[in-house]
């Protein structure tokens, strides 16, 4: 029935394309703000194809269709998308432009929604297809919306004020900083399209995107410190109006298009990665002199101030206690074979909710048993859910949203058997310990100012490489402050393959994850993730400025998966010192059997 539904949807889209005189249409996972996670109204790719991943796109022509995903979703796409309707293509080895050249004739008109793609994307595709006589055509309205009969409306939730005690700086201070940047760069205004950048700049939050506390809106900031906020009127409360003050003009979100034509003869900056091509097209049509530059809020947002840093520590402390309580519950309950992936994820959310201050999860919990743990971005649902097998590895990657911080932690644990006889294999312990060794090297790293994440990545992989294995994801991503769990521009990843952010210089105050892993297909997966803070390091007689990492996440590591014989004396000392910190931070929050479990897990190796 599911496949028939998606077949009918595909057929309806093709009829709509014929009506519009289009040969094909590109369907991304995106919204008007180039968000990583999008609201239900923007889940067009999922509705059309059944694909539930967070990255990828489809191209549909009148007689063919293809799904493009990267290596993270190779298995998932085959489980969720009907192979009789879509061929599977792999990014980056396969490109949309080349596929169109091979599968559509000269004279074809391929539609795209200019609000869902960037200028760079359009230019890259056009460079390939235009010589073949294929035209990329921006559509007036999205044809998916014309055939999606029960498409949800954008969220009506009101925007909320993010208090200065958590933000650490007032919106006025931030706008003044952006105004100074505009003056220095010689621009009259900057368009701020990314939802988390709007939230940071104005010290507002929202409930419009699941797990990311943002409000659907745009900002245009001016060189005199003023700003225009474009937001649906029903989202505006008296508290929000009072908070924003006279220097921020609140305008209907529907007026944003027209506002872009108000800059004739003026210089306007647009972010090339978060600004939809429609924004640039409308600025140009209105006579503005627009330039592509990184949104000045992005780096400013990434460097956390002391209030944000301390708020994050506070959030991590309560979150660590909740995760520890969950791990003890799992150890007691799962060996009976009656705990499944969904039940485990729900129980972890319950422990977080018991803190009394949880605002949301920071992403859908990756609750992955046995072979599912070998899928780094596995998302459990009713169809994929399995019992956690006794005598297996279980991986849980999860996080919480609190007013003072956003958390993200992965722990890999051994699920024993009811009689206690099941033990991890030597291979499991070897791979976990090699992942741990890489994790420790990142945690202990000291590096000069000017170092980027791409230069640190090898520290995490070296011990896996020694064994002839690797992992196919980045080692670390930026994290927001009660904002997006994935936040740029900083990143720790291989400096190849066009990985965004790997060339970004690291600065004191940035949050990053530290999460090397290993994945054996259809067998098990391992990942150890803590969050870290880039901090200044004082070194006697240092020639220049040096940085290091403060570990922020404190939850015990599973000792059953550690082969201490593979660790150096220094590495053992790191694990013992880490567990001392875990005990000191979490003991005051735990009691009874939970506290006894913590003491046992934090004993010296």
Image (spheres, helix red, strand yellow):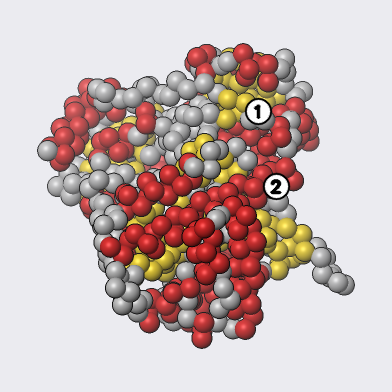
Write down the quadrant of residue 432 in the picture.
bottom left
Callout 2: few (<14), some (14-19), or many (20+) C-alpha neighbours within 10 Å? some
- Tell me if label 1 and label 2 are in contact, CB under 8 Å: no
Q: Would residue 257 appear left or right of 180 to someone viewing this image?
A: left
Please tell me which of labels 1 and 2 falls first in the chain.
1
Q: Would residue 444 appear left or right of 350 to someone viewing this image?
A: right
Cα separation between marks 1 and 2: 21 Å
- Numbered circle sitting on residue 485: none
Which residue corresponds to the image point at 25% horizontal and 36% vertical from the top-left? Answer: 48
Q: In what quadrant of the picture does the N terminus appear?
A: top left
The residue where tag 2 is placed is 310
Callout 1: few (<14), some (14-19), or many (20+) C-alpha neighbours within 10 Å? many
Q: In what quadrant of the picture does the C terminus appear?
A: bottom right
Which residue corresponds to the image point at 71% horizontal and 35% vertical from the top-left? Answer: 165
Residue at the outermost bottom position: 565
| Percent of width and height locating residue 411 | 46, 61
Which residue corresponds to the image point at 73% horizontal and 62% vertical from the top-left? Answer: 547
| Percent of width and height locating residue 303 | 69, 47
- Numbered circle sitting on residue 202: 1
Residue 242 versus residue 419 in the image, above or below: above
Residue 491 versus residue 240 in the image, above or below: below
Which residue corresponds to the image point at 18% horizontal and 46% vertical from the top-left? Answer: 82
Residue 147 can be seen in this image: yes
Looking at this view, is 448 or 600 the one in front?
A: 600
Q: Would residue 11 appear left or right of 217 to someone viewing this image?
A: left
Residue 123 can be seen in this image: no
């Amino acid at each position: 029935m599911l496949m028939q539904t998606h077949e009918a949807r595909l057929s309806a889209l093709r009829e709509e394309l014929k009506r519009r005189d289009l040969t094909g249409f590109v369907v991304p996972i995106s919204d008007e703000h180039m968000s990583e996670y999008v609201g239900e109204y923007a889940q067009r790719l999922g509705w059309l194809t059944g694909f539930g991943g967070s990255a990828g796109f489809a191209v549909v022509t009148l007689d063919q269709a293809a799904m493009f995903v990267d290596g993270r979703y190779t298995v998932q796409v085959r489980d969720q998308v009907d192979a009789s309707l879509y061929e599977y293509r792999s990014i980056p080895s396969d490109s949309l432009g080349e596929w169109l050249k091979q599968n559509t004739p000269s004279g074809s008109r391929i539609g795209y929604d200019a609000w869902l793609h960037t200028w760079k994307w359009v230019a890259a595709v056009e460079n390939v297809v235009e010589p073949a006589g294929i035209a990329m055509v921006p559509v007036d309205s999205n044809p998916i919306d014309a055939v999606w009969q029960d498409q949800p409306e954008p969220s009506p939730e009101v925007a909320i004020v993010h208090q200065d005690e958590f933000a650490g700086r007032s919106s006025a201070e931030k706008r003044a900083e952006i105004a100074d940047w505009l003056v220095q760069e010689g621009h009259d205004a900057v368009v701020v399209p990314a939802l988390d950048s709007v939230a940071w700049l104005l010290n507002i939050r929202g409930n419009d995107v699941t797990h990311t506390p943002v409000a659907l809106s745009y900002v245009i900031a001016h060189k005199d410190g003023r700003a225009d906020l474009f937001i649906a009127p029903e989202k505006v409360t008296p508290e929000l109006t009072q908070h924003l003050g006279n220097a921020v003009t609140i305008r209907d979100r529907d007026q944003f298009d027209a506002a872009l034509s108000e800059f004739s003869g003026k210089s306007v900056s647009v972010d090339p990665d978060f600004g939809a091509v429609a924004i640039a097209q409308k600025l140009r049509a209105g006579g503005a002199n627009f330039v592509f530059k990184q949104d000045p809020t992005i780096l400013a947002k990434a460097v956390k101030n002391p209030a944000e840093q301390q708020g994050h520590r506070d959030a991590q402390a309560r979150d660590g206690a909740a995760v520890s309580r969950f791990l003890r519950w799992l150890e007691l309950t799962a060996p009976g074979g009656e705990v499944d992936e969904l039940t485990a994820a729900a129980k972890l959310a319950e422990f977080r909710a018991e803190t009394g201050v949880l605002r949301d999860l920071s992403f859908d919990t990756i609750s992955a048993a046995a072979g599912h743990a070998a899928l780094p971005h596995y998302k459990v649902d009713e169809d994929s859910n399995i019992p956690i097998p006794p005598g297996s590895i279980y991986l849980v990657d999860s996080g919480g949203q609190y007013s003072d911080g956003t958390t993200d932690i992965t722990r890999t644990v051994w699920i024993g058997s009811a009689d206690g006889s099941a033990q991890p294999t030597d291979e499991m312990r070897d791979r976990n310990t090699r992942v741990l060794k890489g994790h420790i090297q990142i945690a202990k790293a000291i590096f000069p100012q000017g170092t980027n994440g791409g230069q640190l990545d090898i520290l995490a992989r070296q011990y896996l490489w020694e064994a002839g294995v690797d992992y196919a994801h980045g080692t670390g991503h930026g994290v927001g402050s009660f904002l997006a769990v994935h936040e740029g521009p900083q990143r720790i990843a291989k400096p190849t393959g066009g990985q965004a952010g790997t060339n970004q210089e690291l600065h004191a105050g940035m949050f990053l994850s530290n999460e090397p892993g290993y994945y054996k297909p259809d067998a098990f997966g391992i990942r150890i993730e803590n969050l870290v803070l880039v901090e200044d390091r004082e070194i006697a007689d240092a020639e220049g400025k040096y940085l290091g990492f403060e570990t922020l996440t404190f939850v015990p590591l599973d000792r059953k998966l550690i082969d201490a014989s593979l660790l150096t004396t220094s590495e053992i000392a790191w694990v013992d010192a880490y567990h001392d910190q875990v005990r000191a931070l979490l003991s005051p929050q735990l009691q009874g059997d939970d506290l006894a479990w913590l003491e046992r897990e934090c004993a010296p190796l």
